[in-house]
């Protein structure tokens, strides 16, 4: 915080003589912008100064005389403050006190709707206002607000707003936010190339931002959801900008989500890379990598080896969620390995239809005829009824030759289905 604090104080120092109560809001906003940009670039110690400046500016705006806003720079400062994490109630106070019409009511009404959580109601107003303000001092911030208000209904339009914000405010917290949100929009819309381009730019510039953990989550989801459409080299390039601990963390997150999502190839690759990046004295990353690798191996041919690997993982090295994940994986593996067992009652029931069919086919025959039929290997073939199986929503489906399923196997499948459904539900819950 030392460097940032000295810089900000030196900028404010000339105003100390004239007292903070008389300091112009636009000068205070400049200091706030500098601090916020510094935070986005990685100086987390500046966050305390950011809170101090937000509080100081809030007080200055609320207590300032109306004549203060005769200067358009102070009007813009108030609007930037509102869009930079400031108290939205302060904007309401300023609007109520604005008897001289310093503030554009179209803009303030749209911002009030947005800041109160009614962003969709301000979409039309912002679309009409933005061209007028795009090159002003509030332009980059207004672009962020406009993009956020339309990102669900019109992702393409939202990206144009974010792109403009990045163009006019490079190297700032505005660009950081625009890049991060652009990754999400493009990924959700299925624009994979755009998503990877935005992710690459973010990784090059803002990995030290306090919001970089959100970027990591977005990137992991992007890689897992669209692994088939993304080149592995592109993933490696983005991760190359990270230090070893961050790479390992991302690989572990990727392996976990991939394993839960059934992307076993990616889960194995990510777990393997996480293991390689784990140091000799770092047991937890290796344990987690082993767990996720084991999860990916359960659907493979060597289920027994996968289960042994999973069982060997110590619970005390896992979080509560990973312990639940381990238990679910073990249950799945045990179900797969369990030998089918046909209950005695089921065997008796299976025999009943055959006996009943035989009895029905023998009605009305003499003892001599019955004896002749018993010696004829072809007897009863045409007379024995064949049950027609029609699956739900698939009427008149032609049955393959393998339709005569082993009753023991059928009993195993139906008996284990409820337990597997519970396990699937647990895994889906983990992935959400």
Image (cartoon, grey):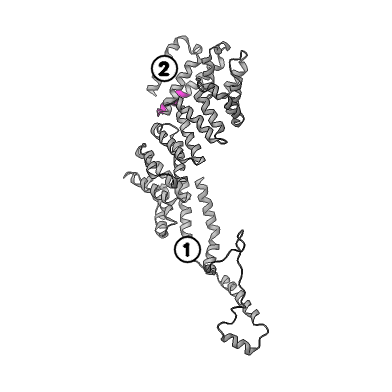
Q: Which residues are magenta?
A: 41-50
Q: Residue at x 57, y 27 (%)?
A: 127
Decide if residue 390 is on the left or right side of residue 236.
Answer: right
What is the magenta segment's predominant secondary structure?
helix
| Residue identifier under label 2 | 9
Residue 354 marker = none
8 or 207: nearer the viewer? 207
Residue 431 vertical position relative to residue 349 in the rendered view, above or below? above
The local crowd at label 2, few if under 14, some if 14 to 19, many if 20 or more residues have their Cα within 10 Å, is some
* Residue 35, picture quadrant: top left
Pinpoint residue 403: horizontal percent, then vertical percent. Answer: 54, 68
At x 39% / y 24%, what residue is drawn?
A: 1
* Residue that carries the numbered disc 1 in the rendered image: 338
Q: Position of residue 180 (x, y in %)?
A: 46, 34
Label 1, label 2: how far apart the Cα atoms are: 71 Å
- Asked whether disc 1 touches disc 2, contact meaning CB atoms under 8 Å apart, the reply is no
- Under circle 1, the secondary element is loop
The furthest residue to the right: 364
Location of residue 31 (image quadrant)? top left
Magenta span includes 131: no
Q: Is residue 40 visible?
A: yes
Residue 108 or residue 409, whichever sits in front: 108
Q: Earlier in the sequence, mark 1 or mark 2?
A: 2
Secondary element type, mark 2 = helix
The x, y position of residue 400, in whole percent, is 54, 67
- Judging depth in this view, the residue of 65 and 389 nearest the camera is 389
The answer to whether residue 116 of the structure is visible from this angle is: no
Q: Position of residue 110 (x, y in %)?
A: 59, 25
């Amino acid at each position: 915080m030392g460097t940032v604090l000295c810089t900000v104080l030196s900028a404010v120092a000339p105003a100390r003589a004239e007292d903070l109560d008389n300091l112009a809001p636009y000068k205070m906003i400049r200091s706030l912008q500098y601090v916020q940009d510094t935070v986005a670039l990685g100086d987390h110690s500046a966050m305390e100064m950011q809170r101090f400046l937000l509080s100081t500016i809030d007080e200055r705006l609320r207590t300032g005389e109306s004549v203060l806003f005769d200067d358009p720079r102070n009007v813009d400062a108030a609007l930037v403050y509102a869009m930079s994490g400031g108290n939205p109630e302060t904007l309401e106070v300023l609007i109520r006190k604005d008897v001289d019409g310093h503030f554009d009511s179209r803009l303030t009404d749209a911002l009030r709707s947005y800041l109160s959580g009614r962003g969709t109601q301000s979409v039309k107003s912002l679309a009409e206002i933005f061209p007028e303000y795009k090159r002003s001092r509030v332009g980059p911030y207004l672009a962020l607000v406009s993009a956020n208000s339309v990102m669900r209904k019109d992702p393409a339009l939202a990206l144009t707003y974010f792109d403009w914000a990045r163009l006019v405010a490079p190297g700032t917290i505005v660009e950081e936010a625009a890049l991060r949100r652009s990754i999400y929009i493009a990924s959700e819309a299925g624009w994979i190339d755009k998503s990877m381009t935005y992710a690459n730019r973010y990784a090059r510039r803002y990995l030290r931002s306090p919001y970089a953990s959100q970027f990591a989550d977005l990137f992991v989801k992007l890689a897992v959801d669209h692994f088939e459409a993304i080149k592995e080299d592109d993933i490696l390039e983005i991760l190359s900008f990270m230090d070893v601990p961050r790479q390992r963390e991302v690989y572990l997150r990727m392996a976990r989500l991939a394993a839960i999502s059934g992307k076993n190839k990616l889960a194995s690759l990510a777990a393997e890379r996480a293991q390689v990046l784990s140091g000799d004295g770092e047991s937890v990353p290796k344990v987690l990598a082993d767990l996720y690798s084991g999860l990916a191996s359960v659907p493979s041919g060597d289920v027994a080896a996968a289960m042994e690997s999973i069982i060997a993982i110590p619970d005390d090295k896992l979080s509560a969620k990973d312990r639940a994940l381990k238990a679910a994986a073990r249950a799945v593996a045990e179900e797969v390995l369990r030998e089918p067992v046909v209950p005695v009652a089921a065997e008796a029931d299976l025999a009943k239809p055959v006996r009943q069919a035989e009895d029905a086919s023998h009605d009305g025959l003499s003892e001599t005829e019955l004896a002749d039929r018993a010696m004829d290997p072809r007897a009863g073939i045409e007379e024995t009824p064949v049950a027609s199986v029609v699956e739900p929503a698939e009427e008149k489906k032609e049955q393959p030759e393998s339709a005569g399923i082993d009753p023991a196997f059928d009993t195993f499948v139906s008996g284990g289905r409820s337990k597997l459904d519970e396990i699937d539900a647990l895994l889906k819950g983990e992935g959400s």
